[in-house]
Image (spheres, helix red, strand yellow):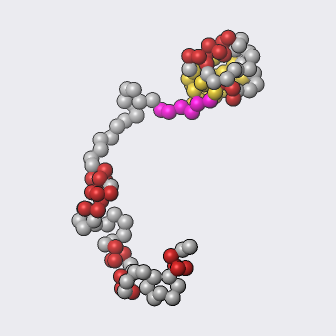
Amino acid sequence: MKKCTKMRGSKTHGYGSKKKHRGAGSRGGRGFAGSFKHKKVRLKKFQPEHFKKRKFKSLRRKGIKPTLQTINLRDLTGKEADLPGFKILAAGQPPKGIIVKATAFSERAKEKIEKSGGKAEKV
């Protein structure tokens, strides 16, 4: 049940006097207004990361690779599959003689595709 339904008949709906439930002045400004002044203690307690300095980290840095979507061998159908932006994983059996073109393959997936008479080509 909503608060407004419960409070029918109450003049102020639980906010004390009428003056206390007015505009943004009753909450010290809208949003993050006052976050470095009168709301600082509250922000430090509930959102301590708000004041931390963070360096920019480029995605081009060595070791950071863009995430690829994954798909299992059991989900492949037909004679040919062209899947740029996907990594093929080894769960299940591939259709016989399938040619798969994808961004990446797990080692076992590559073995299974070649064992079933197909080809695993990187795009």
- The answer to which image quadrant residue 12 occupies is bottom left
Q: Is residue 39 left or right of residue 104?
A: left
Residue nearest the observer in this picture, 14 or 109? 14
Which quadrant is the C terminus positioned in?
Answer: top right
Number of marks = 0
Q: Is residue 113 visible?
A: yes
Residue lying furthest left in this view? 37
Residue 85 in the image, given as x and y percentages of width and height: 57, 30
Q: Is residue 8 left or right of residue 44?
A: right
Residue 97 in the image, given as x and y percentages of width and height: 74, 15
Which residue does the image show at 27% across and 65% down from the upper left? 39
Residue 24 in the image, given as x and y percentages of width and height: 36, 75
Q: Is residue 27 left or right of residue 116?
A: left
Residue nearest the observer in this picture, 75 or 100? 75
Asked if the stretch drawn in magenta spans residue 97, the answer is no
- Magenta region: which residues? 66-71
Asked if the stretch drawn in magenta spans residue 69, the answer is yes
Which residue does the image show at 55% across and 79% down from the upper left? 5
Which residue does the image show at 56% across and 20% down from the upper left? 106
Which quadrant is the N terminus positioned in?
Answer: bottom right
Q: Is residue 119 visible?
A: no
Q: Is residue 78 left or right of residue 28?
A: right
Residue 75 in the image, given as x and y percentages of width and height: 69, 29
- The answer to which image quadrant residue 82 occupies is top right
Residue nearest the observer in this picture, 17 or 39? 17
- The answer to which image quadrant residue 91 occupies is top right
Residue nearest the observer in this picture, 27 or 82? 27
Which residue does the image show at 33% across and 77% down from the upper left? 25
> Above or below — where is 26 with respect to 31?
below
